[in-house]
Image (cartoon, rainbow, N blue to C red):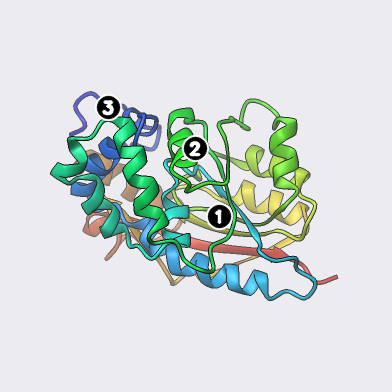
């Protein structure tokens, strides 16, 4: 599976070839054998966090969500629709779906998602460097707005800054490491409402610099060090060895977690400090 793929400095396999296809079929076919599951793990957490954010006195409803590294709109699909990640795997890896052109798939997906739209659906803005992926998510109605921008290298566009001004909750599942404190600093500079952040972060990825930026913008972060969430199986023994090494360097114990064959994440929940 990884023969033509590169790795990060930490030994993590890069799946860059699946992140910016014209539609998500290759993405799901590639990640299905690896049991990629963090969007499903995050779905109910994000729903609970959104409900809590919506209950803050003075909040104008509905709360707008900004999903970082949104890819094909998977978090938005699970947040706003009566669907599981298993449903999406079945849908995008089926023989019926494989036979469709991109245009036919978009037409089918508009109906697929519209029929499963929740009554409590909220606006979701997507941010990702993958222009094809964000375009797909926008075309099928998963995202209300989509921005293919790299805030690690460039400041946000005026349009993105205006969009971030309406955001009340920022979510991210698989992106920390690809994005750093630079992205968070740029986004938080553009916020106009009290913003909460709900971030799932691999145990192999340092989070301290992002925590410092969150703190500098008035956000306090809670993390349960004992609670972990599985992300996916390792692609090969070398990737596992690299992950175990990184976890040990971070002062954590891989026993029963990475040592057993999967990446694991921790959840970091950030909210404005009381005045």
- The 10 Å Cα crowd at callout 2, few under 14, some 14 to 19, many 20 or more, is few
Q: Secondary structure at mark 3?
A: loop
User: Seen in the image, is 39 located left or right of residue 68?
Assistant: left
Tell me the distance, in whole angstroms, between the alpha carbons under discs 3 and 2: 16 Å
Q: Secondary structure at mark 1?
A: strand
Hey, which residue is sitting farthest top in the picture?
4
Tell me the distance, in whole angstroms, between the alpha carbons under discs 3 and 1: 28 Å
User: Seen in the image, is 195 located left or right of residue 103?
Assistant: right
- Along the line of sight, the residue nearer the viewer: 14 or 238: 14
> Of circles 1 and 2, which is in front?
1
Q: Residue at x 76, y 61 (%)?
A: 194
Tell me the distance, in whole angstroms, between the alpha carbons under discs 1 and 2: 15 Å
Q: Which residue is mark 1?
A: 171
Q: Which mark is residue 231?
A: none
Q: Which residue is mark 2?
A: 178
Hey, which residue is sitting farthest left in the picture?
95
Q: Which mark is residue 5?
A: 3
Among the 4 quarters of the image, the one containing residue 52: bottom right
The numbered mark, 3 or 2, whose residue comes first in the sequence reads 3
């Amino acid at each position: 599976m990884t023969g033509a793929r590169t790795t990060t400095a930490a030994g993590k396999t890069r799946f860059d070839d699946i992140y910016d296809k014209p539609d998500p079929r290759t993405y799901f076919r590639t990640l299905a054998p690896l049991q990629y599951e963090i969007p499903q793990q995050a779905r109910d957490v994000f729903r609970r966090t959104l409900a809590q954010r919506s209950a803050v006195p003075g909040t104008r409803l509905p709360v707008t969500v900004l999903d970082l590294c949104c890819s094909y709109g998977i978090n938005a699909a699970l947040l706003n629709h009566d669907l599981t990640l298993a449903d999406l795997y079945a849908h995008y890896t089926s023989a019926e779906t494989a036979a469709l052109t991109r245009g036919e798939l978009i037409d089918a997906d508009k109906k697929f998602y519209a029929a499963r739209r929740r009554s409590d659906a909220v606006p979701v803005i997507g941010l990702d460097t993958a222009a094809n992926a964000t375009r797909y998510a926008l075309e099928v109605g998963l995202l209300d707005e989509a921005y293919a921008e790299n805030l690690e290298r460039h400041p946000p566009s005026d349009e993105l800054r205006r969009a971030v001004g309406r955001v009340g909750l920022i979510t991210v599942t698989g992106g920390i490491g690809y994005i750093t404190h630079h992205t968070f600093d740029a986004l938080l500079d553009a916020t106009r409402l009290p913003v909460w952040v709900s971030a799932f972060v691999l145990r192999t990825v340092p989070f301290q610099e992002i925590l410092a930026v969150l703190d500098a913008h008035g956000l306090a972060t809670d993390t349960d060090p004992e609670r972990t969430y599985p992300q996916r199986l390792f692609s090969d023994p070398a990737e596992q060895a690299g992950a175990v090494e990184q976890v040990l360097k971070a002062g954590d114990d891989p026993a029963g977690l990475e040592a057993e064959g999967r990446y694991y994440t921790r959840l970091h929940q950030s909210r404005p400090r009381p005045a």
